[in-house]
Amino acid sequence: MAPWAKTGGLADVSAALPKALAARGHEVTCFLPRYGSIAFPPGRFIGSVHVPVDALHRSAGFYERELGPNLRVIFVEHPPFFDRPGFYGDPGGDYGDNAFRFAFFCRAVIEFCRSRGYRPDAFHAHDWQTGLLPVYLKAFYPDDPTLYRVPTVFTVHNLAYQGHFSAATLGPLGLPDSLASEDALDWKGNICYMKGGLLFSEVVTTVSPTYAREIQTAEFGHGLESVVRSRADDLVGILNGVDYEEWDPRHDRHIAAPFDETDHTGKAACKRALLAEFGLAAEPEAPLIGIISRLVHQKGFDLVTEAMEALLARPIRMVALGTGEPDVEAGLREFMRRDPRRFGVRFQYDSGLAHRIEAGCDMILMPSRFEPCGLTQMYSMRYGTIPIVRATGGLADTVEHFDPKRRKGTGFVFEHADTTGLLWAIDEALSAWAKPGPWTVLMQNAMSRDFSWALSAERYEAVYSHAQNSI
């Protein structure tokens, strides 16, 4: 949950959706582990509770922080599990006890509510790390006077990450062996936390309508497509929104100068400042392409490195921000070595720099093999930074290919995840860039799109009501 813990779009959603719901009058309580990177104490201590997970006597401490009217976050404190450098792992890989760490978190949230007589209208759980929450509710709390018939909504942000663990984990967690069955948590002899969330929640959502359809197919289902299809009647794709209090060039505190859809003067200043920050040649007539992402094959950036010679031959400059797989990082580093005046890379996460790239670039590149929703393309459009994307998931739902004759569209979209498609889309963008009139129209089209959370929050209200009526 941004700003305390962030590895991807889930953190932005977990911050923005509760704020949008609270603004609509709902009382929203968010729960987050107190990870080691979060300063201690993270808020006001409000007590502790015994959490019956594994054979040890474990307790969770709770720290509360008010975020605004009707909105609070409660940090779950248990240093042996969460006071570590990483959220899910370290450079050596995933933590070996993740099965227990996140089972503990789920059970701690439930026990907090039960011990205080706090009955929510619904639990909203996200991704495999909270996949056991609805399982615990069904297994241990069906008759609890506080939590009886409280429904769960489970959101899949990325089905590729599923939380597979040994079936022997069930015993120490106190869960019945019957859950290690095909119609429950079984996954090829192991157990799958994501499957628990999919099967035991009243409603399943995912983060774009196209992704909701895609994950029911073998190409995008990562082995769980039949499970997803079994919940098709209770599966809803709701496009993520954008927090325009945080992402708007008219009042962005991170950028060199403000601008809007009617006056792009400030954007030119942002471009000059960004070029200087990366030490690139100050040539405003050459387009600047940005990358803000995890640098992994899923995001398609191996295609960028495969197209190196062709891209070096084109009149572009490029800046990239992110970390990821070694071969992708090495390829981007080679761009910088080959032409350090045109290509710059920062292998890190830097929120302020992400804002400056959005404001200072002319185009943003997102060649994803799959993309459940994507937020970067929506941020980019508000900044007049034109997205070049592959037609998948939320990218297909949010970016319309530009037609200069009809003066319609917000970006450039290619179909196939290969270098041919990638270069075609980049060349389409370069062709439009060479014509100032159409490019200005394209920028105005993009900047006028509204992806605010208000509509998405309204759809989630309907989902919560449906979940209540389903239990």
Image (cartoon, helix red, strand yellow):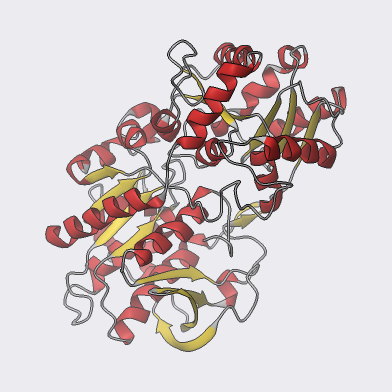
- Place of residue 456 in the rendered image (x, y in percent of width and height, measured from the top left): 34, 49
Q: Residue 287 or 66: which is nearer the viewer? A: 287
Residue 120 is left or right of residue 454, and the answer is: left
Q: Residue at x 19, y 59 (%)?
A: 465
Q: Is residue 388 in view from this perspective?
A: no
Residue 385 is left or right of residue 216, and the answer is: right
The image shows residue 110, relative to residue 256, as above or below, that is below
Q: Residue at x 49, y 75 (%)?
A: 76
Quadrant in the rendering for residue 462: bottom left
Q: Residue 101 or 119: which is nearer the viewer? A: 119
- Place of residue 187 in the rendered image (x, y in percent of width and height, measured from the top left): 35, 46
- Place of residue 173 in the rendered image (x, y in percent of width and height, measured from the top left): 38, 69
Q: Is residue 19 in view from this perspective?
A: yes
Q: How many marks?
A: 0
The image shows residue 165, relative to residue 143, as above or below, that is above
Quadrant in the rendering for residue 218: top left
Quadrant in the rendering for residue 279: top right
Residue 429 is left or right of residue 99, and the answer is: right
| Quarter of the figure with the C terminus | bottom left
Query: Which residue is situated farthest in the front direction here?
Result: 262
